[in-house]
Image: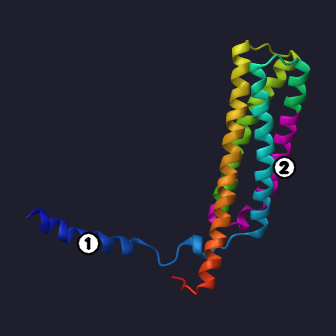
Amino acid sequence: MIRRTITWAAPGLLLAGLLATPPASKAAETPDSEQVSKLLSQAKTMAFELKEDAVTMESFTRMNVSMETHAVAINQIKDHINALTRQTAKLKEARNDGSPWQQTAIDRITPYLDELGGYTYAVIEHINGEVRHTPGEYKDYLEANADYATDLAAMIGDFVDFGKSKDRMQHLADKLEIPKR
């Protein structure tokens, strides 16, 4: 009895899934934008530079490094964040030309930059003596910067890799003359 229910339910579910699926998805309709891909690739490079400097600065918490060295490092990080913010503005301008995955990538960058900006500002305040954070809080800000920068670089890198893989797959499909759905 149970077997028959499953046997009848499976084709019904398959048919319902086929009827609910639109004939052509929006992803297939909207091609990738070369401009957005190029801007994302540049953002990837910028994010990896930011990550390297943030991780290096976080390592200062385990060394005897002068506050002047901290100041130089945080200024580099601030410059990277500002450059990436300008790059993100270019991406937002081109967003509507992008495919759905490109638009998603653009939308996900800003929250990371907002967090990085906040933690970087707290570090700058501490170094400038405007606000005195405890050593533990200061270390937490440096760790948060390193973590967010690492996650941002990985996320942008994954989106860029996805785009390249998608392009390679399409190139192979065209080469093999695989019909499009």
Q: Residue furthest left?
A: 1
List the residue tagged with mark 2: 86
Give the percent coordinates (x, y) of residue 52.
78, 39
Q: Residue at x 72, y 33 (%)?
A: 146
Disc 2, SS = helix
Asked whether the residues under the numbered discs 1 and 2 touch, taking CB atoms below 8 Å apart as contact, a structural biologist would say: no
Where is residue 94, by image quadrant? bottom right
List the residue tagged with mark 1: 12
Q: Is residue 115 left or right of residue 93?
A: left
Q: Is residue 69 left or right of residue 38?
A: right
Q: Residue at x 65, y 72 (%)?
A: 168
* Residue type at numbered disc 1: Gly
Disc 1, SS = helix
Q: Quadrant of the N terminus?
A: bottom left
| Most frequent secondary structure within the magenta stretch | helix
Q: Residue furthest front?
A: 63
Task: Please determine whether, in this image, residue 181 is positioned above or below residue 73.
Answer: below
- Residue 77 magenta: yes
Magenta-colored span: 76-101
Task: Please determine whether, in this image, residue 167 is positioned above or below residue 137.
Answer: below
Where is residue 31, by image quadrant? bottom right
* Residue type at numbered disc 2: Arg
Give the percent coordinates (x, y) of residue 19.
37, 75
Badge 2: residue crowd in 10 Å (few <14, some 14–19, many ≥20):
few
Give the mark nearest the N terminus, 1 or 2: 1
